[in-house]
Amino acid sequence: MTTETRADRTDEAIDAARGLEFYSQMVHIRAFEDVVNDLYKRAAMPGLAHLYSGQEAVAVGVCQALHRDDYITSTHRGHGHCLAKGADPKLMFAELLGKEIGYCGGRGGSMHIADQETGNLGANAIVGGSTGIATGAALSAKSLGNHRVAVCFFGEGALGQGLLYEVMNLAALWTLPVIYVCENNLYNEYTHFRETTAGEILARPAAFGIRAERVDGQDVRAVYAAASALVARAREGGGPAFLECDTYRYHGHHVGDIDRAYYRSKDEEHEWMTTRDPIGRFGEWLCEQGFAAPVTLDDIRSQAATAIEAAAQFALDAPYPVAGDVWRHVYA
Amino acid sequence: MCGGMSMPETPQRELTFAEAVREALAEEMRRDPRVVILGEDVAEAGTPFKVLSGLVEEFGRARVIDTPISEAGFTGVAVGAAMTGMRPVADIMFGDFLTLTMDQIVNQAAKIHYMSGGKLKVPMVLRTTMGAARRSAAQHSQSLHVWLSHVPGLKVVLPSTPYDAKGLLKTAIRDDNPVVFIEDKMMFRMKGPVPSDDYTIPFGVADVKRVGTDVTIVATSSMVQTALGAARMLEDAGISAEVIDPRTISPLDRGTIIASVKKTSRAVVVDEGHLQYGVTAEIASMIADEAFYHLDAPVKRLGAMDVPVPFSPPLEDATVPTEEALVDVVRGLFKKT
């Protein structure tokens, strides 16, 4: 059941157009998070946000393997999942700023963005809290026979939550089309996962008879290849899978987590950012393949930055909800 | 005793409370293929209380789904299924096990519609039980309904008769919100008239179970029968008690309760949850706030004693409000007048 994804699986079906789309999505996510961090530092954003920078290849590689009406559930560190599934940055920024036109009318904020138009059943501020929801969406897909697949994104911190094991057991028993995507960015908030996680991660889903794979989460081609195979298998009735993606978050646990030398070193951060950056590595591959020239990639990054800044400005200019509407949406 | 809704004129068919629940589920499952039941021992076993007996034979194991002993897990699955096109009824065998589902109910189901700005809905029912006096001790006897009533986004239903159980459960299944439907285990064998036709009972509409003029007794779930028994004893003492059953404590029909208290000028609230911070406190506070100048006596409350439910029969029986205790409290309201 437990296998490592081999590098030679990774080149399938990524042509120039697809490759540039992957690249553009990752660049947009990075630009989005840079602007979020800036808004926080300028005190222009209420509350906090948990940035996805560094993990872009996971969201993009997995969501590119999905259809628009497939489901995802996301986490507190969820901006990348939302964007990769097709959310509009304008409406995301508006939600982050608590504006009425935001995805959730400002009721949810950064940690609760949901977008049913793109199958996004919502980010979740309870670690592991959405594992039941994703599994339930997979039960719906199977019961209704609509051939959809559900992807449950969670960080390695959720490996400590019992709910995950309850629902993996159910998914295996009922052969549900759900993929548990564990983004292992090494840190449960401020604690290295080795201090919190006994044994081998993949042995846990494997114990339920769930197909379990591990992939380099900084390599979008590898993530895409692994996710594509597991999603196709689930869609055909092959049952659930677990995909551990080794990755790294460039910022702290949240935007305010600046002084973090007590739990991880600057050298470690530098190493990941310079030698394993998912955008840099994929850009190099695109150029090697002759799919893009460096100047093309420069243009994509520059256009993304401009578009994301415009999206943020749209949200900054948008009105807040009126206080009298606070009662709306308590009940359907 | 089942006033409030029009009853058919044909001779009254009687069902037990358990049969009424089962009939509501069966009718809704025939009406809507999206309705499924999830829970421990719900299929062939039909639950330990046999409430669901026969459903799996009619609807099959794809719709009456036995789960592992994973209350949080299958409740979470029900939440996700509800968000994506199903109308699940999750069966939590004992209300005490609600504790295991709390994140899924309180942080997820109750808030998803609001947090999503009204885009997502969670049309699910969580059926569970309450009530002591079965010699089941502290972890199988609690009445925890007030916990759920504290959470905006949930609806909480406490049926007290077979008639109400059928009509309210059908409403719960058709509601687009998460509904917690709590049945007192001691009532499963209680018989009462239940029409065989399709009827629903709206939420937030209290039922006047007995009309009276001297005192209002607001009672929930099995305490409705306790209140009706007390009312008969009070009648012999020359006190006419009106018994109001809110039927749903969230939403709560404030108008019917306040109108009754304004008429009778005295009120006692009785509920099987613990007294401290309980349903009775909420309703008594509302009465004090909205009918204070109509009251001739303080509003009184009866609930389960604030102790874990004990096993030993004489101890357990001491914890639950009785007809006699209720009569004493009501009579106390008249001593100084």
Image (cartoon, rainbow, N blue to C red):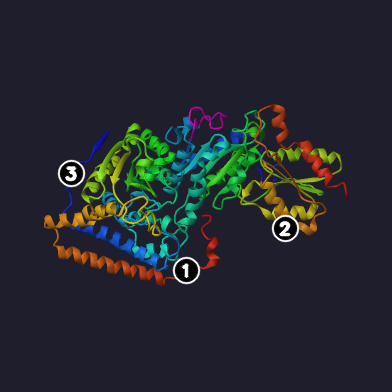
Q: Is residue B199 left or right of residue A3?
A: right
Farthest residue to the bottom: give it.
A317
Q: Position of residue B295 (x, y in %)?
A: 80, 55
Going from the N terminus, do you reach mark 1 or mark 3 first? 3
Bin the neighbour count of mark 3 within 10 Å (Cα to Cα): few under 14, some 14-19, many 20 and up. Answer: few
Residue for badge 3: A7
Question: CA separation, marks 1 and 2?
Answer: 34 Å
Picture disc at residue A14: none
Q: Are marks 1 and 3 on the same chain?
A: yes
**Which amino acid lies under the numbered mark 1 shown in the image of this protein?**
Tyr
Residue A153: percent from left, percent from top: 35, 47
Residue A182: percent from the left, percent from the top?
33, 44
**At 85% across and 47% down in the image, what residue appears?**
B334
Q: Which residue in the structure is indicated by mark 1? A: A320
Report how far apart the C-alphas of labels 1 and 3 lie in the structure. Answer: 48 Å
In which quadrant of the rendered image does the N terminus of chain B lie? top right
Residue stretch rendered in magenta on the structure:
B39-54
Say if the magenta span includes residue B45.
yes
Whole-angstrom CA distance, mark 3 to mark 2, is 71 Å
Chain where mark 2 sits = B
Residue on which the image places disc 2:
B289
